[in-house]
Amino acid sequence: MSNKLFRGLFLILAILASNTQAQDFTESFWYFGNNNAAIQFGRNADRNANLIQNQATPFGNGGAAVAANGVDGQLLFYTDGENVYGKNHQLLPGGSAIGGNNSLRHPAAIVPSSNPNDNIYYIYIIDGANELRFLSVDMSIGEFGEVTSSAQGTGFSNLSDYINSFKLGESYFLIFQENNSLELVQIQNNGTLANSASHEFSIEYALNNLSVRNSMSDTLTLALTSANINGNPKNLILLDLNLTNPTAPLFQNENILNNTGFVDQLITDVEWSVGGRNLYYSRTNTATSEGRLIQLNLDSASSENILDRTVTEIKALQNGPDGNLYFLYNNGADDFLSNISQTDSIPDSLNIQWDLFNMQSFGTAANFPTIAPPALIDGEISFDWYTTTLNQSICQNNPVSFFADYGEFSDITSLDWDFGNGQTSDAISPNIIYEEAGSYNVILTVNAGGNFFVDSALVTVEQFDSEVQLQDTTVCQLPLENYGPTLGDGSEPDQVVWINPDPEKFTDNGDGTATFLESGVYSAAVTVGNCTVTASFELTLFEEEKQKANFWYFGEGAGIDFNNDAGPVAVTDGNILAEEGCTTVSDDNGDLLFYTNGDIIWDSEHNVMANGTDLGGDPAASQGVIAVAHGSDPSLYYLFLNQDVSSDTSNFSYALVDLKLNEGLGDVVLKNRKIYSRSTEKVAAQGNENTNVLTHELGSNSYRLYPVNVEGINAAEYISQGSDYFSNSSATGYLKYAAGGDKVAQAYNSGGAFIDFLRRDSLNNWEEALIDVNFGGEVYGIEFSPSADLLYATINNGGNSVLLQIPVNDDYSIEEIENPDSVTVADLNFEAGAIQTGPNGQLYIAANNSQNIYTIG
């Protein structure tokens, strides 16, 4: 049974406070200003900022509000208080002219419903009469959501031009100024408001900015700025919010910072440094049109303009999730974005990066957006572990795999494992080794968009200090007789099961040894007491030249044997039925181990493997399944599985195959273990001992890369570049790596036929190109040449197909790849499907509804 964890109240004000730890991904997009430029923050540890140019216009130049999924960072919608745009950057139904005054500095705030079972968001706006109103957005309606009500009154009026939202525990709040009083109000389940705390300012004030000091305390220090009133400047105010009693928050200790406001000068914004050591505020001299950015250290009472150049005006300040302080400045014509790192340092140690994104203009934008707090999520988690039996005792000095189960959630933000022996992990499925026998309390913590869930279990590690020996061997002639594993102390194992029995390759002698008729790599499951381990050895025939190859099984019982000395030959002994995606796994000798269509898996004898149905994939998905070696046990394989998006399910999941079981023919010991929902039908893998498994999300521009190695299925790395994949048509087709892993291409059918292409540069950054391949149909098959200099694609339009060859070698710039000088086009007299490189380096093209397979010469 899992238990939900609630963070301390002082950590929940993440929307207002300067908190850069990735508790959630709500702050993944900044949309602001009446231009198409916007910022997307990545989901890797550095939360790197990237320029995107997809913001809808018209859009107000004042503040805005953005809602993103706190779990996976996917955009939901954004608004300037006047219009509401969905993630496709089109007006939501009912989302035009909603009544807010988009000329205000902070005219809108967004809050999710406190009911975790609905998908409702509330938008709060300040209208032209300075009244606070609200309306609702139902994200469950249609593809992108719908505004389902017109703006309703809240009973609050005469507001200044600031409103913001935040989460406290499992409740949501707004903060704003009404008349001359600062108001903290709690949002009810239906969107109405209830008073929580008030503070009457001691001076006349017109709140227009607010920042919360990052503090490990139940008392938060707010820094506030005001618009000038009747031409009179206003000083900064510090105000404490005491949360010692969370049911009765209290404003206290107002402190006016004298001499921060001056005649003919306007404080435009304020922000604490990430660690809370320094306070930054921007001030513009309206007489000389000169802007300053001042660092104020309250401990030393020192203040200093930290800019090293002259600017007309600093318009806005905001901490990003990457830990940098961003500022929007004007040079007399356009607005530009810059940032400061190490903001807790003294002025001489600050690092200012001017004019980000190659001096990208942000037009006349006046402010950054507010960010909706994360939604509440409810559910339970659990986990399993495996050596040779699920959730049983573990053997000392042998790898054990753990598997998180969070299937009630569509996705998660992160995992943290504590194995009770000092080892920790953030992997999806970690592999670890216990070096000492004993009992250990394993704790799994799952973060789902700032909602934390915990499960724990006691695991028993049995003593196992036997050394299994099975040495590589070279012989002058075959057969090699009576060879098998032994133990380091000279004794014999209790049981030996040779994996993938094949009488043409070896015969099991029944006493733990075998007689080997051919060279190759052979593995056995060796049992000593209650512990079973996998041992492998390579048998080499002196001066033999042997080509390693394999089998393919695909389509309706079709197959190719690449092991024939005379070249590939067709085989028809397979039982596979695969409309689209499938995979075949052979061992290092080229011998068949298993094949699968994502729903069913067949063993090397062409029988359905034990527990080998309902795996979690779909034969109708473009790339419904791919197999990857386990990493720490050569007898284990992961199956990574996609579903057909047209069936309204799009989970990316995995299963585990153990070839030690069922007399070496294998058993599916774990299946349908979700990694995330909203995946396209695409998956690719690159590498051997360290394999990168690459997928693409449905609903965003983000790739997910899962490193798979001896440590297990590791946490995702994100590449948020390229096109947005919203429609089902964009989710189909193939995704491929080039050899070496520095190029990626995938089919993209949205508004035409395109290839979404990525290339890693010398600085390990990804460049992107969208290659137009509109030749009268949809792009489906994708493959690189073995040299990675050429890219091939199939275009289908009913029974007609086209094969494309596009140059993508490293001599070309990314712009030249996006707009190639020449594309070789070949008309095909069959309906072409996938393209795949064989073990012989030849490229093969599948023909839909045909027994034939074709090669590219």
Image (cartoon, rainbow, N blue to C red):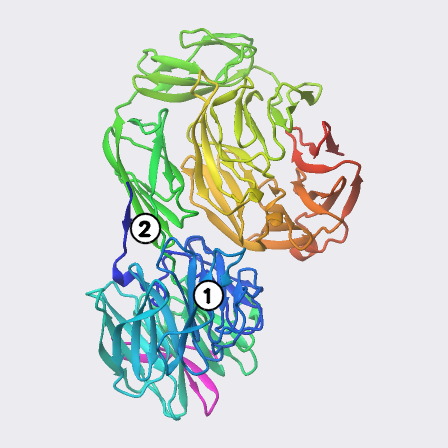
Residue in the image at 33% along x and 39% along y: 382
Q: Is residue 789 visible?
A: no
Name the kind of residue labelled 2 in the image: Phe
Name the kind of residue labelled 1 in the image: Val
In the depicted structure, whether residue 807 falls above or below residue 229: above
Cα–Cα span, label 1 and label 2: 23 Å
Query: Regarding mark 2 in the picture, which secondary structure is present there?
Result: strand
Query: Regarding mark 1 in the picture, which secondary structure is present there?
Result: strand
Q: Which mark is residue 452?
A: 2
Quadrant where the N terminus lies?
A: top left
Over which residues does the magenta segment extend? 283-309
Q: Which mark is residue 66?
A: 1
Quadrant where the C terminus lies?
A: top right
Q: Residue 786's x, y, as percent?
A: 66, 37
Decide whether residue 112 is among the magenta residues. no
Q: Earlier in the sequence, mark 1 or mark 2?
A: 1
Q: Residues within 10 Å of mark 1 (few under 14, many from 20)?
A: many
Question: Between residues 442 and 9, which one lies in front from this camera angle?
Answer: 9
Decide whether residue 284 is among the magenta residues. yes
Q: Which mark is residue 727?
A: none
Q: Residues within 10 Å of mark 2 (few under 14, many from 20)?
A: many
Q: Residue 222's x, y, as percent?
A: 29, 73
